[in-house]
Amino acid sequence: QVQLVESGGGLVPAGGSMRLSCSDPKRTLSAYAIGWFRQRPGEAREFVAAETWSGGTTDYGDSVRGRFSISRDNFQNTMYLEMNSLKPEDTAVYYCAERIGRTFSLGQPTEYNYWGRGTQVTVSS
């Protein structure tokens, strides 16, 4: 059973930076990608970023492109989401998720098999 371990999150002023991490300690060769999503109260889950474990594919949501970046440490089975130039509208619960097996739809939350518990990110104005 995959259990994703998230860390990071908290309170940051607007314009600041924050890094989230997502680890899969028991990652197998069938693990294809990690995606980051966020959700605000009363809203649908929004795609933030995703990267394949091979590094061959990286994608970002339109609202974060140019401000957020995703990176990975395959030896540590960990993916990182570096968030810069944060805005109050970035406030949300951030989730990481793992896709098992190949997909061409990394931006769709329904494509992911396992989810972390989520971590709150609050950007103060």
Image (tube, rainbow, N blue to C red):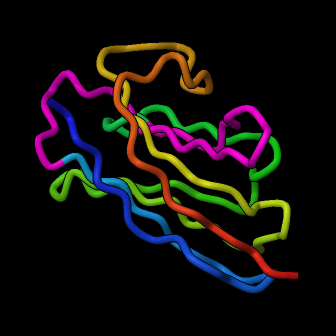
Q: Which residue is depicted at the point 68% across and 83% down?
A: 12
Give the answer, above or below, for where 44 lies relative to 17: above
Give the answer, above or below, for where 18 lies relative to 81: below
Please provide percent x and percent y for residue 100.
30, 21
Q: Which residue is depicted at the point 72% across and 40% down?
A: 61
Q: Which residue is depicted at the point 39% across and 36% down?
A: 115
* Image-quadrant location for residue 32: top left
Q: Which residue is depicted at the point 82% across and 48% down?
A: 63
Task: Please state the extent of the stretch shown in magenta in the rendering.
Answer: 25-51
**How many marks are shown on the rendered structure?**
0
Compared across the picture, whether 115 is left or right of 70 comes to left
Please provide percent x and percent y for residue 16.
71, 83
Residue 44 belongs to the span the image colors magenta:
yes
Please provide percent x and percent y for residue 45.
67, 35
Residue 104 belongs to the span the image colors magenta:
no
* Image-quadrant location for residue 60: top right
Q: Quadrant of the N terminus?
A: top left
The furthest residue to the right: 125
Give the answer, above or below, for where 63 lies relative to 110: below
Compared across the picture, whether 55 is left or right of 88 comes to left
